[in-house]
Amino acid sequence: MLLGAIADDLTGATDLALMLSREGMRTIQTIGVPKAGLDLLDVDAVVVALKSRTNPAAEAVAMSLEALSFLQTAGAKQFLFKYCSTFDSSPAGNIGPVTEALMQALNTDLTIVCPAFPANGRTIYKGHLFVGDQLLCDSPMRNHPLTPMTDSSLVRLMAGQSQLKVGLVTRETVGQGASAVAEAFEAARSKGEEALVVDALTDADLRVIGEAAGGLTLITGGSGIALGLPANFRRAGLLRPAGDALAFSAPAGRSMILAGSCSEATRGQIRTAIDAGVPTLKLDPMAIAEGRFPVEDALSWALNQSARAPLIYSSAEPDEVKAAQSALGRERAGSLIEHFLAEIALGLRAAGVRRLIVAGGETSGAVVGALAPDALFIGPEIDPGVPWTLTLGQTEPMALALKSGNFGAPDFFLKAWDILP
Ligand SMILES: Nc1ncnc2c1ncn2[C@@H]1O[C@H](COP(=O)(O)OP(=O)(O)OP(=O)(O)O)[C@@H](O)[C@H]1O
Ligand SMILES: O=C(O)[C@@H](O)C(=O)CO
């Protein structure tokens, strides 16, 4: 095992596992810290998917340290803490506290902070995070139901969330290549800087940064920062040739879509599906909270549809989300819906659904937590950052596509089925 990664949510873990697999590492994604006995003999990278992004910071730290200890025991040589490409977090954390705790546990004095993911429009310039053409704070992320992002300065965000001394490596340095970046890391280290935000505008920048980061014990960032890491292991003669990839074959059975993401991208994908005639059921958080709409009603609606893949969603516009949150509380509204969608997923599996798309990281965490596979095998890519996966360790495997809220083209819910082998 070469690379051990800890991801703070499930769709983020899948995004990273896809990136590593595409770059030639045999990668598996585990759901939480795996039970003893998981066979890692033929694996180059393990991504442990946690659901720690919105937990209290102390809990997120404890979960991440447990994952680290598993990865250390499994023999990982380098570690990666994967968070969202939009730096989803609250002022109390969790990116800062988890990074600090991992650095301390690994006894390392320098790491990098690089959530750039150019294929999905996330770039970093002068330490500021952009989403497409907008600064993070002007993007739809300012309305996120759980982690609204109202500052775009990664240096300020990281300094606010931790005690770490935060520095910046600018695009000018990255443009000069890997040796210049590695020198900048050493110069920062000698100034006592501990967490370096690194600018990145393109995949080529990320490969340069990845090369320069070959000697760092801990790297933090989005999936993009993993682009250049497999090449380091290959150069060192540690990465075996890819060999025959396991065949991905989706189990036969019914198909469904569940969406709990309220992101602009998911709402657009829902509109496209409705326009294309996909049958949809919109959940009302108040009806769920007041017991007026039980899981059984959602299941009987779903199972009575004859269309290929009906869609159940709670996704709502920002004003509807605010109304539900002021009636129920932000966390209660979130967990109520997550739990409801997870119960639906269990009912769907019992009724023979074997192919499922889930939209939203927290939502996917709740759904996959309920379905409880040991691990996920990464299959074909639907859109950047979103592959089909196959559940491992279960007698009735399912094909799951776990879509980060903001990812995917407008026709994601339509085209995903066409690439399923
Ligand atoms: N109508 C609603 N009102 C209030 N909260 C909602 C509503 N619908 C969904 N939610 C909650 O909003 C949160 C959405 O988070 P989730 O991580 O699933 O999506 P996302 O943030 O768009 O995706 P990602 O984390 O992959 O970027 C969940 O906790 C969900 O339960
Ligand atoms: O980095 C991203 O944007 C995603 O992998 C993610 O973490 C969304 O939850």
Image (tube, rainbow, N blue to C red):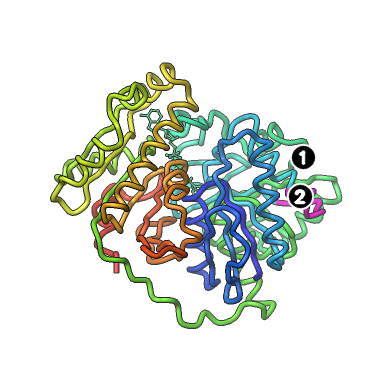
Residue 108 is covered by the magenta coloring:
yes
Residue occupying the point 60% across, 59% down: 35
Residue occupying the point 69% across, 43% down: 62
* 111 over 163 or under it: above or below: below
Distance between the alpha carbons at the discs numbered 1 and 2:
10 Å
Residue placed farthest to the top in the image? 327
- Crowding at label 2, few (<14), some or many (≥20) Cα neighbours within 10 Å? some
Image quarter for residue 94? top right
- What is the span of residues highlighted in magenta in the rendered image? 102-111
Q: Give amino acid for label 2.
A: Met
Q: Give amino acid for label 1.
A: Leu
* 163 over 390 or under it: above or below: above
Question: Residue 169: horizontal and vertical position, in percent?
Answer: 69, 49
Residue that mark 2 sits on? 103
Residue occupying the point 59% across, 81% down: 240
* 353 over 148 or under it: above or below: below
Q: Secondary structure at mark 2?
A: helix
Residue occupying the point 61% across, 49% down: 114
* 134 over 308 or under it: above or below: above
Question: Residue 192: horizontal and vertical position, in percent?
Answer: 84, 45
- Mark number displayed over residue 59: none
* Badge 1 vs badge 2, beta-carbon distance below 8 Å: yes
Of 213 and 386, nearer the camera is 386
Residue that mark 1 sits on? 164
